[in-house]
Amino acid sequence: MHSFTHEGTKISYYEYDEREDKTNGLPIVFVHGAGSSHIIWTIQAREFSRTHRVITLDLSGRPSSGTPKGCASVEHGYAHEVSALVQHLDLQDFVMVGHSMGGGVVMSYVLNPQFKKPRAIVLVNTSSNLDIRKLAIGLAIEFLEEKLLKIKSRILGDATEELRIIDEEQRLKDENPEMLSRDMDACDEFNITERLGDIDVPTLIIHGADDDIIRKGRARKLQEAIPDARLALVPDSDHNPMIEQPQMFYVHLKEFLDWIEGKT
């Protein structure tokens, strides 16, 4: 784990790089969602570090990072923390991947003309409007489905890496209830729907086809509104396709990265 200070607040980040040739592959910055942390990207960090420099971070409010005074903000807080990370690492040519609230952070980052522009972005199960009041029923359904999956897996003795990640993420939420509450407040204030047409970098939207929190119809609206966007729906996946269908997620992201890196 590494860290730096942004406006008086500690921000922790993690780097993974197993490349034999360090000149190959664009750096990838992964941004987690609400109530989450870098842990959510465990599988992707391992897989993509073989071909790319991978960077994950813990946004402010996580136990490993500090918590600034005042309310959290997707656009004016978290996006600025990611920009500070990019500046700290002096990244010049990179791709950003954001999940759920992290997708909102990535879109906000791209829409800020003062920030270094990424080569491309990837939006995972996210929306341009994260008003939690509209997502409450889906959150409840996903919570119950996740609980049932855990019970079934434990009965069958199927302790997969995916379940261990889910358990770690849940433990993080249980031990730090103020973290999730802070993120939810930030999501309630986030709506950039009218600005989607200004996103001017190639965009891949990866979306779990069975997501009850942010339904696939929203993903299609993102694709229609962002000028250079493509959509990959992941079957048999809910809100976390990078955990629920990691191999399929890997294929979609790798194909997009290969295409971006092949462009002149």
Image (cartoon, helix red, strand yellow):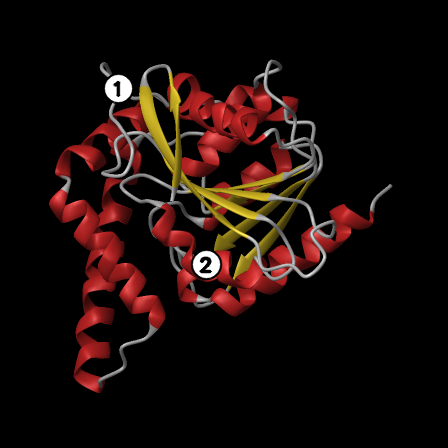
Determine whether the residue tagged by mark 1 lies in a helix, strand or loop. Answer: loop
Callout 1 amino acid: Pro
Which residue corresponds to mark 1?
Answer: 68
> Given the current orientation, which residue lies at the most extreme right position?
264
Query: How far across and how far down the image is residue 63, in percent?
Result: 22, 38
Mark 2 — residue?
Answer: 242
Q: Which mark is residue 227?
A: none
Residue 144 image-quadrant placement: bottom left
Amino acid carrying label 2: it is Met
Residue occupying image coordinates x 33% and y 44%: 37
- Residue 88 image point, x, y percent: 52, 27
Image quarter hosting the N terminus: top left
Left or right of 184, for residue 13: right
- The mark nearer the N terminus, 2 or 1, is 1
Q: In the figure, is residue 182 to the left or right of 239?
A: left
Q: Residue furthest bottom?
A: 156
Q: Is residue 242 above or below residue 148?
A: above
Would residue 141 be seen by someone viewing this image from the given angle?
A: no
Q: Mark 2 Cα within 10 Å, few/some/many (few <14, many 20+)?
A: many
> What is the x, y in percent for residue 236?
44, 68
Q: Residues within 10 Å of mark 1 (few under 14, many from 20)?
A: some
Q: Secondary structure at mark 2?
A: helix
Mark 2 vs mark 1, CA separation in Å: 29 Å
Location of residue 146 with respect to 159 vertically, above or below? above
* Vertical order, 9 against 163 (above or below): above
Q: Is there any visible trace of residue 126 in the rendered image?
A: yes
Report if the CB atoms under discs 2 and 1 are less than 8 Å apart: no
* Image location of residue 166, percent across then percent down: 28, 60
Q: Residue at x 28, y 33 (%)?
A: 132
In the displayed structure, does residue 109 sit left or right of residue 94? left
- Residue at coordinates 22% horizontally, 84% vertically from top-left? 157
Q: Dividing the picture into quarters, in which one does residue 58 lie?
A: top left
